[in-house]
Image (tube, rainbow, N blue to C red):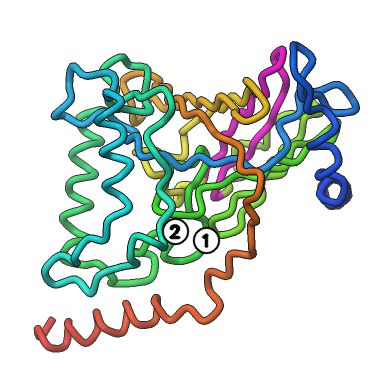
Amino acid sequence: MGKRFVSALVAVIGVMVVSPMLGVAGQTTGPDAARTPWGDPDLQGTWSYASLTPLQRPTSMTDKEFFTAEEAAQRNYSVTLDQPPTPGSVGSYNALWFDRGEVSSDLRTSLIVDPPSGRLPTRPEVTARQAARRDYLRDHPADSWVDRTNWDRCITYHGVPPISTGYNNTYQILQTPTYVAIRVENIHDVRIIPLDGRPQLDDAIRQWNGASRAHWEGDTLVVETRNFSDKTVHRFPSSQNTRAVERFRRVNDDEIDYRFTIEDPSVYSQPWTAVRPMPRLDDYIIYEYACHEGNYAMTNILTVERVQENEAGR
């Protein structure tokens, strides 16, 4: 196991050194565009999954599958404006700091395309449990550090698959003949995904972002991820039984068609699929995401909660 990990790491380090050359080598036009020297579709580069398109279709748009061009433009413009903090809040970054992206180029009102409603098919009992958990956390936001999110704790952020948030919504993809490495900008995760047909991890082995295995179906890279931890928190309802299947297909020099399907019978009444075009970011530089260094937020959150408990006599 240790030797295989070292081999994978060496392979990824090697491709990180040569990837700028590989990313250019296959960039031609026509049916043979964007191939690696060993013949696989070349997905290498930095890509954005930022999107103002919500995961679920808003309930106010039940029968509206697409934004108009004018609605999309207004939505894109609205996020460039600073908003005053809500009462009782100290506020957040101003608009300049955020990089929320734009409405997806297909103008859909939801990233979810199946079911056709654009809504998560969450089981009612799961929805009830989530509501009870939200009610509890409203009154007990920081009994312990484990009550805080994975991203508050700098463990992992967007999860697998990622859902767009306020900033740092980028993937850097690197390839070798036997591995694909996906560097996630936010909280500096690196997914090292084997392509060699090895079996999935034993069911007893669980990981924050699950365990991924990949293969090619024609020109589409298919990545299956399972073995999530029971502590994993996605930005949608999930459990340790969740199975994610991602599909990456380069449609032209500047865009990857990215879609994923989530299966989890313990959470959903049926599988659901979301689609998000990922544009290429040619001049984007990913710097180290130093999450914990100089971060006093967790200490302050827990300290203030203890003070408030004492003041309330709890």
Q: Residue at x 50, y 26 (%)?
A: 260
Q: Is residue 179 magenta?
A: no
The answer to whether marks 1 and 2 mark residues whose Cβ atoms lie closer than 8 Å is yes
Q: Residue at x 28, y 39 (%)?
A: 75
Against 69, residue 31 (above or below) is above
Provide the major secondary structure of the magenta segment. Answer: strand
Against 220, residue 256 (above or below) is below
| Residue, disc 1 | 155
Mark 2: give few (<14), some (14-19) or many (20+) Cα within 10 Å: some
Q: Nearer the viewer, residue 81 or 138?
A: 81
Q: Position of residue 302 (x, y in %)?
A: 32, 79
- Disc 1 residue type? Ile
- Residue 190 lies left or right of residue 110; in this view the side is right
| Residue, disc 2 | 150
In this picture, which residue range is highlighted in magenta?
Answer: 208-228
Tell me how far mark 1 sits from mark 2, CA to CA: 5 Å
- Secondary structure under badge 1? loop
- Residue 124 lies left or right of residue 103; in this view the side is left
